Image (cartoon, rainbow, N blue to C red):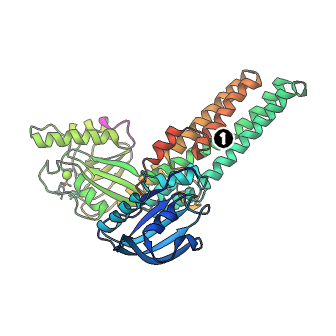
Amino acid sequence: MLYDTIVGIATLQGMSAINVVRISGIDAIAIVNKIFKGKDLSTVSSHTVHYGHIIDGNTIIDEVLVSVFFEPKTFTGENVVEISTHGGYLIPNKIVELLVKNGCRIAENGEFSKRAFLNGRIDLSQAESIMDVISAQTETQLRLANRGLHGDVKALVGELQTTILDIIAKIEVNIDYPEYDDATVMTDNILRPDIKKIVSRLSVILHNSETGKVIREGIKTVILGKPNVGKSSLLNSLLKEDKAIVTEISGTTRDLVEGDWNLGGVILNLVDTAGIRNTDDAVEKIGIIKAKKALSEADLVLLVLDQSRSLTTEDIDLLTLTKNKPRIIVGNKIDLGKHIDIKLEKTIDVSAKNSTGLDQLEAEVKRLFIDESLLKENQLMLANARHIGKIGEAKTALEDALKACENHFPVDIIEIDIRKAWEVLGEITGETGNEVLIHALFSRFCLGK
Ligand SMILES: Nc1nc2c(ncn2[C@@H]2O[C@H](COP(=O)(O)OP(=O)(O)O)[C@@H](O)[C@H]2O)c(=O)[nH]1
Ligand SMILES: [Mg+2]
């Protein structure tokens, strides 16, 4: 391995029982050996753990356990040592300092994973899944991330690339033996059906990935309505906690109040807002500006109406404002009766106060955003926006190839589009692509990872 030896603290620092300092590189074992009092680490077997002390000259820094892994079967593919130290800030940092003095360099964010990728231990989709595994908040997110980590995305991409390569091979044969086939027969009888098949496969993948993306990223949801319709009450009853202040006084909520509603594996990131109305109150005004900004960033609007009374122009304005957004109209205060006199699209009747109708609301969110059959069958869904984008690009390239076929372009011209699709898919796994992308991706990782 050509790289220098890096060190990073792999655990969260603070008042914890232990910390792990991780070292990777050709000199990892030799460097640790210089500051370790215990067994001679150059003589131990790979994948073993050793008790001893980290020392600075004659001073003992900490009592530790040292795990030793010889290349190539390690996380990074290089020699790796993990030192389990006592917790806190001082000890692990002191050990890092000592290691740097003895020849290590402090690792950049994600550099361990980057080396694992560069040394061929994992592909890019697996590296990205590591971060997803770490940041998973629901079991569904974790399940999806684990499939990526185990190489399911990589396998899918490999399979798609092989199919595309088969088409390229057919074209190459045709180019090499032009007398072998008539070009029009080639495009009409062979290429078009083959390409169409992959395009429809990519369409299915893209469709399923909509659910995947929602699972991974959650649904940014803004609760909107005029003052006093029960927005804050709705937030509280969905979250089952008194997060936002509820009073009968209009204009109570001024700042945004947020909370996550876990819908059986899908997270709704709820934002309760100040009721939108004309007001002279300076603070409330700012709240309303924030509400409108939250609206522009939202994936979903819960538009709350007080259906125990007639609608006002403020309600109508909000109905117009949110017309082009995915929205659910929530008819609150159903316990007081239904008095809305104008015809509305589907309304979900709830009583935020008595927590009724919330199941129907949940069902409506699921109907709009997720394909539950995919979840039940534990189907593979792409969830990472970068991967989904690349699948989309591949599909576009193949659609271009189809158009070129229809226009009876020469096959070597059609091949350019098909090759593009192959290449773009390779960017998902990092097989094709450039260094800038790879650097940018890994720099988003946490330190020591
Ligand atoms: N009867 C009834 N009152 C409600 C319901 N939801 C909210 N309220 C009352 O309506 C008033 C305004 O509620 P709040 O949640 O602060 O409304 P916001 O201004 O839209 O956030 C409070 O007095 C609540 O107790 C409901 O479902 N039924
Ligand atoms: Mg409120």
Indicate whether 204 appears above or below 182: below
Q: Is residue 138 magenta?
A: no
> Which residue carries the number 1 mark?
200
Q: Is residue 312 visible?
A: no
Range of magenta residues: 321-327
Q: Main secondary structure of the magenta part?
A: loop
Q: Is residue 376 visible?
A: yes
- Give the residue drawn at x 51%, y 47%: 210
- Position of residue 118 in the picture relative to residue 140 (left or right): right
Q: Residue 441, percent across and down?
A: 47, 45
- The number of numbered badges drawn on the structure is 1
Residue that lies at the very extreme toward the front in this rendered image:
57
Q: Residue 319, percent across and down?
A: 30, 38
- Give the residue drawn at x 41%, y 61%: 99
Q: Residue 374, percent across and down?
A: 56, 56
- Give the residue drawn at x 38%, y 36%: 324
Q: Which is nearer the eye, 330 or 377?
A: 377
Q: Which is nearer the eye, 209 or 113?
A: 113
